[in-house]
Amino acid sequence: MGGVIDAPALPPPAIVAPAPREVSFGLVVGSAPVGTRRVIVRVGEQVLADRPLRGARFSLRVDLPPRIVSVRVTAVDGVGRRSSSVVAGVRGLPQRAAPRAATRQLDHVLSRSVVGLARSFAGTSGIYVQDLVTGRGAAWNATARFPAASTLKLAVAVTVLRARSGVPAPGSQVGALLTSMLVRSDNDAANALEVWLAGSTSAGSARVNETMRALGLVDSEMYGGYERTPQGLAAPIPIRTESSPAFGVGKYTTAWDLARLARAVYLAADGKGPLPALGVTASEARHLLWLLALVDDRGKLGRYVAPGVSVLHKAGWLATARHDHGIVLWEGGAFVAAVLTWNPRGLGTSADVLAGRVAAESLKRFR
């Protein structure tokens, strides 16, 4: 009596991109087992792509939801056998916002809005905004130096990734410190990373300054560590100084420097810009953007943007200064924004409102 021989299981596809704990602009790349005829990409029950396949390699673009998702890739062979691989913890970003280089050009309409907002602010402000697709943008007082507060923690993170190889593993000391520093703005974590870099906060801050100089950021200074975190808490865009805050010795930066820092991380996510030459890989840059996307603070640049618009940012604040800088992405593109504010008498929500209005006006213009 003859037996029935079951066909062997179809091996699962190998996924190269996207990767866990990274942002993705919708690129799905990998290889399928021998005999695969179709590749299906899903998020939950939603089918994002169902494509025929010739050969073993696949590379396709899909529209990922603007949130953290699990991406399932299924291979289907000629007799209907299926196998799947899942990548969890992927932060979807719009396809059309994928990194590209663009020459900065002054947008006169946006410039009038930005200058008007700056002049109506009861204090000193520095603003830089640029569409990352067209290069158009505007600025006000963009090279004035402000107390940096926590904004330079992004520079600390870039320097840490320069000094090591690959995205930190989940649960690792460096990975936990990066998350705490960027997502929760923890000062102790920033200090610990500076010590990890060079043995002390002063030596670590010198390493951070070296990174910023290598990127051409000459108006920013790390200046040691942070105070301990209390428990429980067409023409070029004009780059000039209109007025500068008067403050003592300490960390400082400018809207122009912060915008270039955020833009460098964004471009590096696709292997572009200056950071790859400094040792920061595309995967590491995508992980940094993934961390910035976890920041739960929509009260500044994200104050007036609608749900579905992604704000990947790092803010900083002191009694007399409140800042925000990062990348704003929507279905049609992306822009970088840096809004710095200072008032010797202190700042309330007016500074956050200014950041929100600058982002809202920029989004309206670039859309």
Image (cartoon, rainbow, N blue to C red):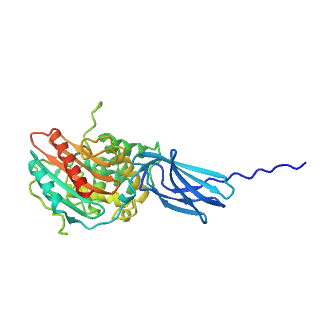
Locate the C terminus and report the quarter of the image it occupies: bottom left
| Residue 75 visible in rendering | yes
Q: Residue furthest top?
A: 232
Look at 29% across and 45% down and name the residue there: 306
- In this image, 138 relative to 2: left or right? left
* x and y, in percent, of residue 360 in the image: 23, 49
Q: Nearer the viewer, residue 220 or 105?
A: 105
- In this image, 341 relative to 38: left or right? left
Look at 26% across and 64% down and name the residue there: 135
Quarter occupied by residue 139: bottom left
Quarter occupied by residue 101: bottom left
- In this image, 239 relative to 312: left or right? left
* x and y, in percent, of residue 205 in the image: 28, 51
Q: Residue furthest bottom?
A: 234
* x and y, in percent, of residue 104 in the image: 23, 65
* x and y, in percent, of residue 268 in the image: 37, 60
Look at 62% across and 51% down and name the residue there: 83
Q: Nearer the viewer, residue 117 or 252?
A: 117
Q: Residue furthest right?
A: 1
| Residue 203 visible in rendering | no
